[in-house]
Image (cartoon, helix red, strand yellow):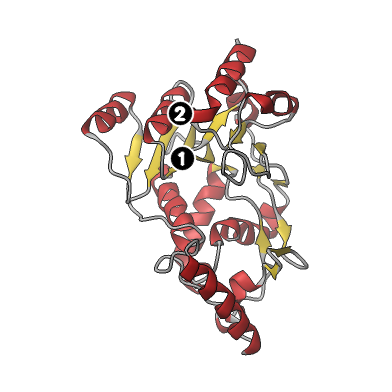
């Protein structure tokens, strides 16, 4: 049995349709941002589908709460001893291969599928991303996307650079910092390892809790510093993402114009989908699978 964890914060009816589709092959666990209000009809539909849904955390972009929600959902998944493999996707994902083929690919598979690389030399928005874990941030209380949040971030980066802040040293972390996408596919023993590591290594988890975009660091860093697990990593998370701006979104909201490159890829899931723009693409994908 395989499980899909969905992290959702908008487009609830779309998320429910995604969950309904996936339930034919997978156990589905959804975490809804605590700021989302489900209607009685939506809850009724989720219950009818047998989807396990939760709303533990108010999730904020760039904050620890994104990773925290993922970790809490992992704790729920490992309660089911029948689950052997776990997929983490967003509420704006959609499967782009037959569900049977996706399921078969991971069945009896002990590989870890994730994007992963050392942070050394990597810059985003002109910033060395190692600073995002060396320095202190609190975007669960400060809206990083607001004007205030943007000013705060720049000033904070500048001041902490001048002061040579290094919380990696404070929390006595001597390993490598790795980064990659939060959208991963993991054997259940690796999910258990992540949960157990988080419970036993509070000093390391404090680094991520006080970092920026830690959802793109915590799994890769924990797994990448375990030499046995590292051997099982395949640096491919089988996700199609268009890193361009489209329909006011970056990464792009996908439509039928992206169909050819999606089906030509080795992706199992793609994002972002939005029913306002992506319905024709979903129909094309459905027809290609039939």
Within-10-Å neighbours for mark 2: few <14, some 14–19, many 20+: some
The residue positioned farthest toward the bottom in the image shown: 163
Q: Is residue 72 left or right of 245 when viewed as pictured?
A: left
Where 120 falls versus 160 (above or below)?
A: above
Q: Quadrant of the C terminus?
A: top right
Residue 19's x, y, as percent?
43, 29
Rendered position, 23 above or below 53: above
130 sits to left or right of 78: right
Q: Tell me if I can see residue 15 in this picture.
A: yes
| Front-most of residues 152 and 105 | 152
Q: Residue at image x 29%, y 26%?
A: 45
| Residue in front for this viewpoint, 195 or 88 | 88
Q: Name the disc covering residue 174, or none.
A: none
The alpha-carbon separation of the residues under discs 2 and 1 comes to 9 Å
Find disc 2 in the rendering and name its residue: 18
Location of residue 102 with respect to 60 vertically, above or below: above
SS at badge 2: helix
Circle 1: element type: strand
Determine the residue located farthest toward the right in the rendered image. Answer: 121
Above or below: residue 135 compared with residue 71: below
* Residue 104 x %, y %: 61, 24
Quadrant of residue 59 within the rendered picture: bottom left
- Of the numbered discs 2 and 1, the one sitting upstream in the chain is 1
- Kindly identify which numbered label has been placed on residue 6: 1
Q: x, y percentage for residue 188?
A: 53, 43
Task: Please give the name of the residue rendered at 48% of the width and 57% of the height, measured from the top-left corner.
Answer: 61
Dot 2 and dot 1 residues touching (CB under 8 Å): yes
Q: Position of residue 155 (x, y in %)?
A: 56, 79
Residue depicted at x 68% and y 64%: 125
């Amino acid at each position: 049995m395989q499980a899909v964890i969905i992290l959702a914060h908008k487009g609830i009816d779309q998320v429910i349709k995604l969950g309904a589709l996936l339930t034919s092959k997978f156990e589905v666990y959804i975490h809804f941002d605590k700021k989302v209000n489900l209607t009685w009809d939506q809850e009724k539909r989720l219950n009818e589908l047998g989807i396990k849904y939760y709303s533990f955390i108010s999730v904020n972009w760039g904050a620890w709460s994104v990773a925290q929600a993922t970790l809490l959902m992992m704790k729920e998944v490992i309660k089911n001893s029948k689950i052997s493999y776990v997929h983490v996707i967003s509420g704006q994902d959609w499967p782009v291969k037959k569900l049977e083929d996706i399921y078969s690919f991971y069945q009896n598979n002990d590989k870890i599928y994730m994007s992963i690389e050392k942070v050394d030399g990597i810059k985003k928005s002109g910033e060395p991303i190692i600073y995002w874990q060396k320095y202190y941030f609190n975007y669960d209380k400060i809206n990083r996307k607001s004007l205030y949040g943007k000013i705060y971030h720049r000033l904070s980066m500048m001041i902490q650079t001048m002061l040579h802040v290094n919380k990696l040293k404070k929390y006595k972390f001597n390993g490598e910092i790795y980064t990659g996408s939060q959208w991963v596919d993991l054997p259940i023993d690796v999910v258990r390892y992540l949960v157990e590591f988080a419970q036993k290594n509070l000093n390391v988890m404090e680094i991520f809790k006080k970092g920026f975009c830690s959802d793109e660091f915590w799994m890769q860093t924990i797994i990448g510093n375990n030499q046995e697990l590292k051997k099982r990593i395949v640096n491919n998370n089988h996700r199609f993402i268009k890193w361009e701006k489209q329909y006011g979104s970056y990464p792009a909201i996908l439509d039928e114009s992206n169909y050819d490159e999606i089906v030509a890829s080795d992706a199992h899931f793609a994002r972002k989908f939005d029913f306002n723009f992506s319905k024709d693409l979903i129909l094309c994908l459905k027809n290609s699978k039939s």
